[in-house]
Amino acid sequence: MMFWDLKYFLLVMLPSLVIGIWAQMKLSSAFGKYSQVPVDSGMTGAEAARQILDHAGLNDLPVEEVPGELSDHYDPTKRALFLSSGNFHGQSVAAVGVAAHEAGHALQHLHQDALFNLRMALVPVTQFASYAWMGVFFIGMIMHFHSMLWIAVAIFSVMTLFQLVTLPVEYDASARAKEQLFRLGLVREDERAGVSKVLDAAALTYVAALVGSALQLLYYISAARNDRN
Ligand SMILES: [Zn+2]
């Protein structure tokens, strides 16, 4: 069994690549479209996020600008919201939607959302797992030490679990975003549909990541099962 054999390419790499590219294309198209649609309120992404945070009592949580495209994120360790320049200054449905989504993560943190906390706790474990599993797997293969393959599989499964937990956290952040935007009157009813399209497309990239990780996990399980000699 090799990592880079044809079966691996056809069963894992190719489908992961196809669904990954498909998700990216959906996101690019939705984001491209709605970053050209201005919000009626004339609000920037930064202003929308600020309003949502202030309304939740998070007046001291900073909203900062970061370079890059779609580099927007909420950093729970710094307790700060970072928006890419385009979304920070943008007055579009897409910019306001993404900014509100990141504010949604800050609300999850504030409300001690269980899955958000679990995801946060899994970050360092996942980082360790992403390095450790391959080393253990290779040593197991080379030394024909069968049980090490299963240890590698177990370590890898932490990464799949992380992707699995990420998914509901992302959908929940988007749901909170839409609710807040509408409740605070930051977007109109018809604008909300555009926000949904952008955020749903963004969530697809997390679905793609989960599918890729799950395919890899299944492949390694079958590789470990077949390695009986
Ligand atoms: Zn998110």
Image (tube, helix red, strand yellow):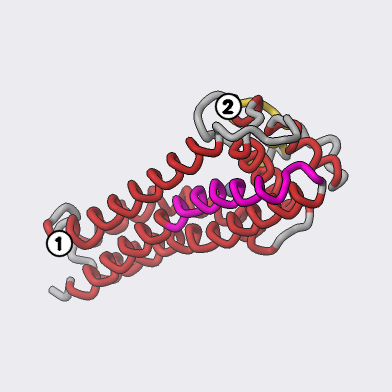
194 in magenta: yes
The kind of secondary structure element at disc 1 is helix
Q: Is residue 142 visible?
A: no
The type of residue carrying mark 2 is Gly
45 in magenta: no
Nearest to the observer: residue 176 or residue 158: 176
**Residue 221: % across, % down:** 29, 70
At label 1, counting other C-alpha atoms closer than 10 Å, the crowd grade (few under 14, some 14-19, many 20 or more) is: few
Q: Which residue is depicted at the point 40% across and 44% down?
A: 24
Placement of 100 over or under 37, stated as above or below = below
Q: Which residue is mark 2?
A: 86
**Residue 136: % across, % down:** 31, 57
Task: Kindly report the distance in space between the C-alpha atoms of the residues bearing marks 1 and 2.
Answer: 42 Å
Magenta extent: 185-207
Residue 11 figure quarter? bottom left
Numbered disc in front, either 1 or 2: 2
**Residue 17: % across, % down:** 28, 50
Placement of 148 over or under 174, stated as above or below = below
Residue 165 figure quarter? bottom right
For marks 1 and 2, the one nearer the N-term is 1
Question: Is the CB–ligand 1 distance for label 2 below 8 Å?
Answer: no
On residue 7, which mark appears? 1
Nearest to the observer: residue 198 or residue 59: 198
Placement of 19 over or under 58, stated as above or below = below
Q: Is residue 99 visible?
A: yes
**Residue 63: % across, % down:** 72, 31
Q: Decide whether the magenta segment is chiefly helix, strand or loop.
A: helix
Query: Could you tell me which quadrant the C terminus lies in?
Result: bottom left
Q: Which residue is depicted at the point 62% across and 60% down?
A: 118
Nearest to the observer: residue 221 or residue 46: 46
Q: Which residue is depicted at the point 64% across and 43% down?
A: 97
